[in-house]
Image (cartoon, rainbow, N blue to C red):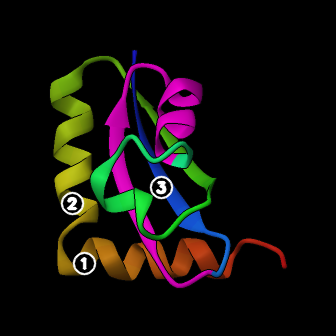
Amino acid sequence: MYYLYILLNYSKTKTYVGITDNVKRRLREHNSGRSFYTSKFGPWKLVYIECFENRNEARKREKYFKSAAGRKKIKKILQSIPG
């Protein structure tokens, strides 16, 4: 299984979209500074996740979320998160 995930930094100014086969491990890597982009804006929290049968399907969805339409969808997702 592969997962598409969206992270939000605690100051709520940045989001990050990625895919992985292990969400817990990947979140630890982001928060420990092992990822170049996310090391500058952390700490991060997981705000959204989708599950896929294979990496190719997850990659297609990741590309969507990195498009203009996908960024609008992310804004709607973030608005539905309490507090």
Q: Are marks 3 and 2 in contact (CB under 8 Å)?
A: no
In-image side of 57 versus 45 (left or right):
left
> Which residue is disc 1 drawn over?
69
CA–CA distance between discs 3 and 2? 13 Å
Please provide percent x and percent y for residue 2.
Answer: 37, 23
Crowd band around label 2 with a 10 angstrom C-alpha radius: few (<14), some (14–19), many (20+):
some
Q: Nearer the viewer, mark 3 or mark 2?
A: 3
Q: What residue type is labelled 2?
A: Tyr
Residue range corresponding to the magenta coloring: 12-30
Please provide percent x and percent y for residue 82.
Answer: 82, 74
Q: Earlier in the sequence, mark 3 or mark 2?
A: 3
Which residue is painted at 20% across and 81% down in the image? Answer: 68
Q: Is residue 54 above or below residue 62?
A: above
Q: Which amino acid does label 3 sit on?
A: Ile
Which residue is painted at 52% across and 57% down in the image? Answer: 7
Q: Which of marks 3 and 1 is nearer the N terminus?
A: 3
Q: Is disc 3 placed on a helix, strand or loop?
A: strand
Residue 6: mark: 3
Q: Does the magenta stretch include residue 1?
A: no
Quick one: 12 or 56, which is closer to the camera?
12
Residue 64: mark: 2
Crowd band around label 1 with a 10 angstrom C-alpha radius: few (<14), some (14–19), many (20+):
few
Q: Do the residues labelled 1 and 2 touch (CB within 8 Å)?
A: yes
Crowd band around label 3 with a 10 angstrom C-alpha radius: few (<14), some (14–19), many (20+):
many
In-image side of 63 versus 75 (left or right):
left
Image quadrant assignment for residue 17: bottom left
Q: Which of marks 3 and 1 is in front?
A: 3
Q: Which amino acid does label 1 sit on?
A: Ala
In-image side of 33 versus 59 (left or right):
right
